[in-house]
Every structure is written in structure tokens, then in C-alpha cells.
Image (cartoon, rainbow, N blue to C red):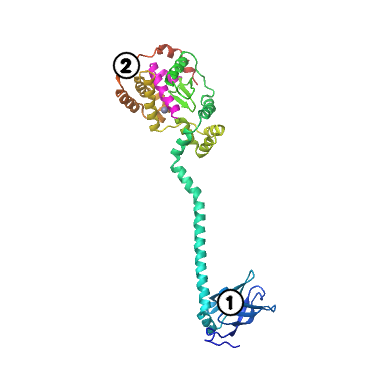
Amino acid sequence: MPAAPGSLGSGARCSVQAMAYGAGFAATGTPLSVELDAQGFSLRAPDGRELAVPWSAAGVRRHGFNDSRCEIAWHDGHDRCALSLGDAAIIAELYALPALREAAAAQRTSRARRDRATRRWVLLLLAIAALPLLLFGLVLWQFDSIVSRVVSGVPVAHERAIGSALIGRYTEGKQIVAGPAADMLRELGQKLTQGSRYSYDFRIVHEPGVNAYALPGGYVVVHSGLLRVAENAEQVAGVLAHEISHVEGRHGLASLVRSAGLAAVFALVMGDTGAFATLSRQVTDLKFSRDTETRADRDGLERLVRAGIDPAGMAEFFKQLDASAARMPDWISSHPAPLDRHAAVQEAIAKLPPAARQVPRLPYDYATIKAALPAAEQSR
Ligand SMILES: [Zn+2]
């Protein structure tokens, strides 16, 4: 049947030459004759099969150079097949067919739905991919509050194990001083730590530097050089009270976690004190912020008052520190300036009730205790 322009829409059939591609056709296309009508198209495949495909199951689009040809595609089982038509009059009629227009509209709708679904999936995948980044950002942003939460949840026994793993490293190869100074330090320490959940270990290390530090779990180390600079037991008590406040506030533990990073947080959360101690080995110094130091001064002052020790010793010691500044580079570098601390502590003392300030002196002959310290030149 020859092509009959204008007749497809009115129910007529027409026959047109086309190239067929896909399963069952030649790789370079099979020329054949196709019957078209308002409902669909039919053809005889090279293997003799009669195919009849309704427009609703076919996709029709322009293709070829200048879009002058028309492709009709359909699925034959799992295989995609296509016809390519070049007859301009027939193509115009095809596009005017209501059934084809409806099929095209339905396909556009389903494609739009598919696109929307795809967009949703892409967004979801992007969100999943961005989640670790977001979490990481959140962790960085909230690191300090995460650290304090994790640190406050560590059992005392774990903290003690961490401190015990660290104390050996801090005092390795150093002479531990015994005698009256060590006795005094222990007695002052006991007075200042009444009712504490920690069991303390106060040590004097024979070192010329004017230094004292606290390690997690109740370890407090004082250098003999600091005891030489102090003038009386009240001043030593002031230093001890400050260091004890670092222990009670878990400042050392928090500082270690901050320096050792997220892996340390994880080790602590898992209760893996061994791993934590290993990570902490990379941390050479416990660094405290000025705020932390100021807090330890303030808490230490309250601690002195509760223990019935004259808090003026703490303020006096900062004066002493300032006077001996040339000999104490490490303490100065990590702490606020001694004179600032002196002023702040003096101010706090002035606000105390008179009874807190008028207390008996501590019963130590400090000059004798100092004289019993190992000779300074023996220090390593
Ligand atoms: Zn401190």
C-alpha cells in the first residue's frame, strides 16, 4: 500500500519504507516495509515473525541530520529495537496522531517522575557522603565541650592508671627527695585534700628549676628548686593547693586529651587507659590556658581557707616567683605573669572574712627543712 498522506489520523493504514535496527535485524540495519495506522505499526521481521506494536508501547522521536528523520523505538522482550523513517509526509502525520501525542505526554510525565526520583536519590547520597564531614566539623566545633564531657565521665581508677603510667616518664632518672621536706609536703597535702575522691601521691624531685606540676589521678610533683625559692610552709601550701586544684578539676587529663586528639577521646570512652597513656606519650607538656590557671588559683585559695592555712602564702609566693624570674623559664612560659596572679589573689584574699586571714602559722621550721634538702649543685 503506498503512503497516503492525510489518511493516518482518519483510520487508514499506510505502508512506508524504513530501516530496522536491534535484535533480529542486521547490525547495519535491515531495510523493510512497515504498516502504520492510528493504533500502532506492524512489520514482518527477517526471521518471519509478524510484529505488531501499539503506539503506547513505542517511543517516537526526531533524529538524524537536521532532525529530518524519525525514530520509532520499542522493546522486543529485553531487546531494544528501532525503526528509522525518512518520509517527511508520513513523519508529519505520525506526530499529528492523538495516540502518539498521548504516549509522548505519558512518557514525558514518567520521565519527569523518574528525574525527580533520581534527584531525590542524588540528594540523599550527597547527604550521606557529607555526613562524616558534617560530623567532623561538629566535633571540631564542639571539641572542648566533648573533651570536658568525656573527661568528666572517666572513672577515678582509670585516671589513676593513666597518671601512674605517666609519672614514671616525668620523673624517670630523677632523684626523689625524702626527709623533712617530703614529710611536710605529705602533711600539707593531706590537710588540703580532706574528703577528696583521689588518693594523692606527693613527691619532691631533685631538680633546680622552680617548678611544680600535677598529673591525672592525684600525682603532684614539686621540684626541690621551688622549695628553695619558697620562704615558708604557707607559700609551699599555696603551690600545693594550686596543683591539687588541677587534679580535682581534671585539668591535666583534659589537656592530655586536647593535645593527643580524637584518638585519645576514643581510647578514654572505651576505657582503654593503656592506649590513652601511649597516645599521651607524645604530649611533652601539660599546657593549661590562662583561664584554667586562674581557676586553679581561685580554687586553691578556697582550699587553703578550708584547711585553715593562711592564704597570704599563695600571694607571697607569686612575689617570690617574680623576684626569681631568671631561674624559672618553664613555669613562667605556661602560666600567667606572677605579678598578675599576685594581684588577683591579693584581691580575692581582701574579700575573705577576717577569720580566714587570721589563722595560726603552720608548725614548720622551714629554714631547717630547706637546709636539709640535697645540695643544689648535685641536681641533674
Ligand atoms: Zn597551674
Q: Looking at the image, which residue is at 34% across and 22% down?
A: 315
* 41 part of magenta stretch: no
Residue 226 among those drawn in magenta: yes
Instruction: Please rate how many residues cluster around mark 2, counting C-alpha atoms within 10 Å: few if below 14, some from 14 to 19, many from 20.
Output: few
Query: Which residue carries the number 2 mark?
Result: 358
Q: For the residue labelled by badge 2, is the local secondary structure a helix, a strand or a loop? A: loop
Q: Residues within 10 Å of mark 1 (few under 14, many from 20)?
A: some
Q: Nearer the viewer, residue 297 or 357?
A: 357
- Which element is circle 1 on? strand
Q: Position of residue 259 (x, y in %)?
A: 48, 36
User: Which-is-in-front pick, marks 2 and 1?
Assistant: 1
The secondary structure that dominates the magenta segment is helix
Q: Position of residue 185 (x, y in %)?
A: 45, 17
Where on the picture, by quarter, is residue 56?
Answer: bottom right
Write down the residue under mark 1. 54
Q: Amino acid at mark 2?
A: Gln
At a point 42% along the width and 26% down the height, the residue shown is 245
Which disc is residue 299 wearing?
none
Give coordinates of residue 368: x percent, y percent: 42, 11
The residue range painted magenta reads 224-249
Ligand 1 occupies quarter: top left
